[in-house]
Amino acid sequence: MRPNRTVALRRITGASFFLFAALTGLLGSGCAGIGGAGGSEACASLSEAEARRAGALALYSKGLLLESGDGSETNANRTAAADAFQQACLLDPDNPRPLASLLSSLNELARHAEALERAERFLARNPSDTEIRVEAARAADAAGRPADAARHCAALMAADPDNRELAAAQIRLLFQAGDEQAALAALAAQHTRFADAASAALPVQWALHFTRDEANPGRGLSCARLAADLHTNASERAALTALIGECQLLLGQTNAAERSFTEAYLADPESVTPLLRLGAVLATQTGATNRLACRAAAGTAPEADLARLLLAATLQALGDRPAAAAELRRAYTARMQAGLFPDEGFYLWLGSLYESDRRLTDAERLFTEALAVHPDSHEMKNFLAYMWAEQGVRLDRAAELVNAALLALPDNAAYLDTKGWIRYRQGRLYEASQLLLRAAELDREEPVILDHAGDALFAIGREAEAIALWKRSHASEPKPEVAEKLRRLGEPPAAP
């Protein structure tokens, strides 16, 4: 990165001081005989090495002046500065100061391969120079040579093993270089060294990246397996096992994915996500619903219970929500007869099916009952509060519920959206706009939040901002009602 004017002037001042000090020392040693015989001749005769160092410092200062002076943003001045630094390096090849400036200039001029070559030559003679090693790693990265950049990062890590930013860069470079095993070893080494939440989260982040962003499920699977090995919390391991199942599905390993999703659910029965994913897999198989129905009718708990849940998940995946809800009600009855209240995830699953089919009375009754069993469930409090906000009923009670949910998660975008929407329904428009803008800031992609924030801003006269939010909402998820708001204002939405 090119230094700003203040930094450049500091560098010039420092270089001028060193130039003055060096020349003073050189001239002082050469003129020690002034006043004596032959003093004038001694003053005029510097050794070749001393003269070269003095010349290098002068060229270094010239380069800094060119780099920071008027017109320094032009390529001509940048090239001239690089030439001055290069000549300084030729005169004093083991001085890292002009070389560091030269490497910075070459990288700025996109001459990355040349910068790397010069840095490598210097490091062969001075392997412990950290500043030049950093420049070499940057040049190699910019030149598209990740293996070389990772090698330099490894040398830097040996001197600074607690530098997490450097370790993260090394891991990225190893993956880019195609050295997956070394990258995984580096991830494991970070957890061995620190053994904390941050080090355990690193392989999870890479697993999600390869699964969702880079479409490389093979690497995602390797990272997810490593992450599962590093986590001891049961619910976290279950979530990672489900992620392993996702990667296996993307790799076409359907049977392995089914086993992973089943294992994830059994490890954490309160999470229904593995069941829903497994139901989506079973929905593609001929006769799956009949087989599951037979298992549910013939089996005994807990096998029959699991079969009913899988049947509900499969029916939901096939688009038959009423039948899925009916199976969940049967599972609910069976659990209650066994003296077991359903867990929080079960209530949320069944309630969402009711809400999707607009069976709002059933959903309200279910969540009211569920909160008596799980009074600390902030998710159910928010769900019920949002249902009431959508209907415009019991708004004061809805506000109490969502406030309780926000005590648990004060920066949850969905909870802030619920509270903002309640305030909007109550006519407290300025408070609503503040809450909804905060929610939109925390979650910039959720179309419902963007739509709500647009409604609140439009209501207080901030039309241009409302239009911008509605456009973002429509681009994320085209909905006729949002498109109609835009058309009424002469702003036809762009095609998705």
Image (spheres, rainbow, N blue to C red):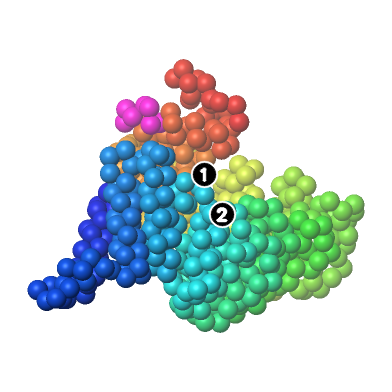
- Disc 1/disc 2 C-alpha distance (Å): 43 Å
Asked if 367 appears above or below 108 in the picture, the reply is: below
> 132 or 171: which is nearer to us?
132
Of labels 1 and 2, earlier in sequence is: 2
Checking the image for residue 446, the label placed there is 1
| Kind of residue sitting beneath label 1 | Glu
Checking the image for residue 302, the label placed there is none
The image position of residue 474, as x and y in percent, is 54, 32
- Foreground disc of the pair 1, 2: 2
> 52 or 382: which is nearer to us?
52
The image position of residue 394, as x and y in percent, is 41, 46
Asked if 427 appears above or below 153 in the picture, the reply is: above
Q: Residue at x 43, y 28 (%)?
A: 467
How many tags in the picture? 2
Name the dominant secondary structure of the magenta segment: helix
> 327 or 449: which is nearer to us?
449
Instruction: Tell me if residue 465 is in the magenta stretch.
Output: yes
Instruction: Tell me if residue 236 is in the magenta stretch.
Output: no
Q: Residue furthest left?
A: 35
| Kind of residue sitting beneath label 2 | Ala
Q: Secondary structure at mark 1?
A: loop
Tell me if 362 is positioned left or right of 17 in this view: right
Residue 201 figure quarter? bottom right
Dot 2, how many residues are within 10 Å of its Cα: few (below 14), some (14-19), or many (20+)? some
The answer to whether one can see residue 354 in this image is yes
User: Which range is magenta?
Assistant: 459-466
Tell me if 100 is positioned left or right of 274 in this view: left
Asked if 362 appears above or below 217 in the picture, the reply is: above
The image position of residue 179, as x and y in percent, is 68, 67
Checking the image for residue 113, the label placed there is 2
